[in-house]
Image (cartoon, grey):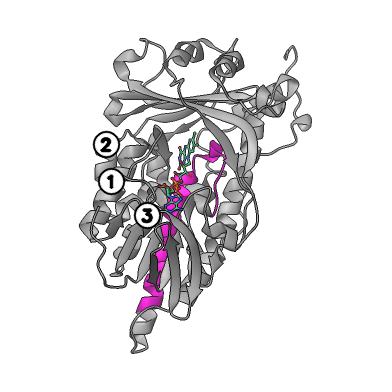
Amino acid sequence: MSETTTTRPDVIVVGGGIGGLSAALALSRKGLRVRLLERAKEFGEVGAGLQIAPNCTRMLADYGLLDEAKTLGVVPKAMVMKDATDGSELTRLDLEDLERKYGFPYMVIHRSDLHGIFLRACQRAGVELLTDQACVGYANTASGATATFADGHVEEAEMVIAADGMHSVARRLLVDDQPVNSSYVAYRGAVTIDKVAENQVSTDSVVVYIGPGCHFVQYPLRGGEMFNQVAVFQSPKALAGEEDWGTPDELDAAFEGMCEPIQLGLPLMWRDRWWRMFDRDPILNWVHGKIALLGDAAHPPLQYMAQGAIMAIEDGWVLAEHVGAQQAQRTADGGTGVDWDRALAAYNAVRPEHCRRVLSTGRKWGELWHVDGVKRLQRNVILRSRDTYDYTYTEWIYGPTALTPEQEPPLYPIIPLASVTLPEGADA
Ligand SMILES: Cc1cc2nc3c(=O)[nH]c(=O)nc-3n(C[C@H](O)[C@H](O)[C@H](O)COP(=O)(O)OP(=O)(O)OC[C@H]3O[C@@H](n4cnc5c(N)ncnc54)[C@H](O)[C@@H]3O)c2cc1C
């Protein structure tokens, strides 16, 4: 996109997804010269909708981007969880009350719209944006760190941020791990609202149907002009170790017998592509000298908490706050520049632990969604007993993003299901 200048930047960001762009923006707001290099030939996002909770919209407001996001997205009235088998309601969040409580909205937005908002903000902020730049290696130097690219050229800066996604090259500097296969697969589909059968669903809410080995999510997008759906299920072929898994025949089989709104929604899914769902085990060190992981490179999650992109945005905001604090300290001490080691240590002291909790809670939350038989009935008893206005379990995620290590928060009610007594006559 823009020409490389010969001036050495203060920061290099590798990867131009939502994580990389938002970090580049946050750091440039601290007066730093930022150069971002993306592997793809053009900037863009593949996929459909994203849910963004108050812990993210709070940051969009800080960046002056919330109004644009609200214009492009939708602020739904409620998030409703239903049983996929019979369609009955299990629990809900009143998103108008949630906004009053946290001061910022819970909203949904097309991924490419959120990506575009950050891309345009980076352009306005003067971030150097380069495409067709595949990073193949990272190294520390005496005065910072380098990133080496497939064409052989080397970029150097005071600090290098690796926002290069799930298959991060930089992650290998810190851990020798592999993505963990969940055996679940996601289908997506975003269609114009006229394609949605009348009365099929509430178009002013996020609705999540949870069922045996599957779930189905529906919500409006783009000011209500589009309708987004995600269908997720466990692939029998993946469990059997077959290579060709998650295919459309498995999609149809997984949702057979589920409630009517799902049956009406299924034909609207894209059938020519699907996303096999992998995460990685949490790691508690993201920093190697002046090289730091950020976003999915550090913490690729299963998406049950809907916090993956949000965590990436939080990473950049927190890092920039610590860089700004170290800059201010240097100035107060009569010097210039940033104490990068201190800024990175502060980032590393707070973000990995928070993201570890999100990743591990997400795995458990997903297990609870997908139970069958008696366990399904026991789970439903727990979810139905939750008061709509009880925020005990959302506080640690949706509250203000911590800049220092947090107290241990309550996890979601991962109550042993066997302890739940079913009402008389309940039949699995
Ligand atoms: C079905 C599904 C639903 C989801 N729903 C939500 C949701 O509701 N809310 C939410 O917050 N999150 C959600 N997520 C998670 C979210 O999409 C990701 O966590 C987020 O997009 C990660 O952003 P990132 O920028 O860190 O990584 P990526 O989006 O993977 O971006 C990495 C970028 O780096 C580039 N790159 C990679 N390697 C190199 C290289 N070697 N050199 C240069 N560039 C490179 C890539 O081309 C890419 O542009 C969902 C995920 C899935 C699968």
Q: CA distance from mark 2 to mark 3?
A: 30 Å
**Visible in this render: residue 404?**
no
Q: Are marks 2 and 3 in contact (CB under 8 Å)?
A: no
Point 31% across, 73% down: residue:
8
Q: Is mark 3 within 8 Å of ligand 1?
A: yes
Q: Earlier in the sequence, mark 1 or mark 2?
A: 2
Q: Mark 1 — residue?
A: 117
Inter-mark Cα distance, 1 to 3: 22 Å
SS state under label 3: loop
Query: In the rendered structure, which disc, 2 or 3, sits on the residue that comes first in sequence?
Result: 2
The residue located at (66%, 33%) in the rendering is 367
Residue 385 higher or lower than 302, as above or below: above
Amino acid type of the residue tagged 1 in the rendering = Ile
| Residue numbers of the magenta segment | 298-327
Q: Which residue is mark 3?
A: 133
What amino acid is found at the position of numbered circle 3 in the picture? Gln
